[in-house]
Amino acid sequence: MRHRSLLVLTTVITTGALTLTACGSRDGGDSKDNGGGKKTTVVIGVDAPLTGSLSALGQGIKNSVDLAAKTANKNNEVPGIEFKVEALDDQAVPASGQANATKLVGNKDVLGVVGPLNSGVAQQMQGVFNSANLAQVSPANTNPALSQGDNWGKGEFKRGFKTYFRTAATDVVQGKFAAQYLFKDAGKKKVFIVDDKQTYGAGLAAIFADEFKKLGGEVVGTDHVTVKETDFSSTADKVKTSGADSVYFGGQYPEGGLLADQIKKTGANVPLMGGDGIQDPAFISASGEANEGDLATSIGYPVEKLDTAKKFIEDYKAEGYKDPYAAYGGYSYDAGWAVIQAVKAAVAANNGKLPTDARAKVVEALGKVSFEGVTGKVAFDEYGDTTNKQLTVYKVEGGKWVDVKSDTFNQ
């Protein structure tokens, strides 16, 4: 039977923080290793929506990083170092993310942070981390501006924050990939585009629209919905009367599922397509109408079909986490492992001890990280973006998401 490390959970009511102790020790300081020596505690922070409508994704992120820390401790990946995880709930709210970033910066033991889920939240966290030389690796952010600057669309690329990295491909890749599939593979020529006015959704929809038109497709209408609202009947009616043969939605699954439902209730027999934000079982369950034929793109290949992910899946199950690893579990594990490898490099370069400027050295080492991870080769380019450009198209078939095409996208 696989040994399960003791998990100590401390809830700090005033901050919403969850401290996951990925080791057998109950104390918050140094712990003895089997050889009797002292180990130095290194904390990996996690920021994600642990409550609210996106908590299914956030919990998967938190648990996957926790598993990476447990694995590193079990294998003595970094001699002399014991990893712990401190997870903070941002509820997908930018201001909460910024407050969490400040809290994590204030903990001197935090040498890297995994998260957040939402690009809009990341925008409010980047500056805080950068000013403190604290590495941030998101498993899910896809907005290109986070790493390539606000003028990336004009071909002007500028990395604004040296501390920012991500294991997720950007929306430049995802939006173009979606447009090419819908136009070429699905044969759709007239699309109605809807977004949720958020950083992720609006950005993704814009990239998709630009590529779809370049391919020769027609955007027959556009509209916007508001996050946390539930009545999208006016938008559904616009889709019905537009003559669209498809809908593209830039946003998340809570609104996407309801929108798909209400469009189908008008009698419009057209598929709705979206990005990785809708590729969740909750998108399907949110609709009272059958979602057959609806489409979504997602970063990477299906984790369940990757040989490199087999051990991750087995270990995650063995730990008995209450929530599934969800869409970003593999990328979260890899993000956590990247931080661990950067710490390992910093320690190795300093005669087996943490350097006094550990945060700066971890940031420097992250840029050189390269390993075979759960999701494939993990490495970062000069902007901190993943070099892994694999994507997958999913279709709803028989009431569940089924992968229908996986490919490596070359811009």
Image (spheres, rainbow, N blue to C red):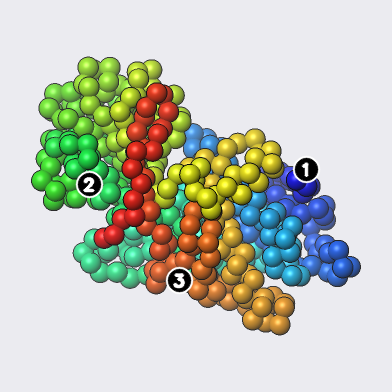
Dot placed on the residue nearer the N-terminal end, 3 or 1: 1
Q: Residue furthest front?
A: 307
In percent of the image, x 77 and y 43: which residue is there? 1
Question: Looking at the picture, how far across and down is residue 194, in whole percent?
Answer: 25, 36
Question: In percent of the image, x 35 and y 18: which residue is there?
Answer: 289
Say what amino acid the circle numbered 1 marks.
Met
Secondary structure, mark 1, is loop
**Separation of residues labelled 3 and 1 (CA atoms):** 43 Å
> Which quarter of the figure has residue 106?
bottom right
Give the mark, 2 or 1, whose residue is nearer the N terminus. 1
Name which of mark 3 and mark 2 comes first in the sequence. Answer: 3
Residue, disc 1: 1
Residue 180 tag number: 2
Closest to the camera, between mark 3 and mark 1, is 1
Quadrant of the image occupied by residue 241: top left
Please rate how many residues cluster around mark 3, counting C-alpha atoms within 10 Å: few if below 14, some from 14 to 19, many from 20.
many
Front disc: 2 or 1: 1
Instruction: Please tell me which residue is depicted at 76% across the width and 70% down the height of the picture.
Output: 80
Q: Amino acid at mark 3?
A: Lys
Mark number, residue 162? 3
Label 3 vs label 2, nearer the camera: 2
397 to the left or right of 16? left
The answer to whether marks 2 and 1 mark residues whose Cβ atoms lie closer than 8 Å is no
Q: Quadrant of residue 401?
A: top left
Determine crowd level at label 1: few under 14, some 14-19, many 20+ residues with C-alpha closer than 10 A: few
SS at circle 3? loop
Q: Secondary structure at mark 2?
A: helix
Quick one: 267 or 311, which is closer to the camera? 311
Direction from residue 344 to residue 151 in the image, left or right: left
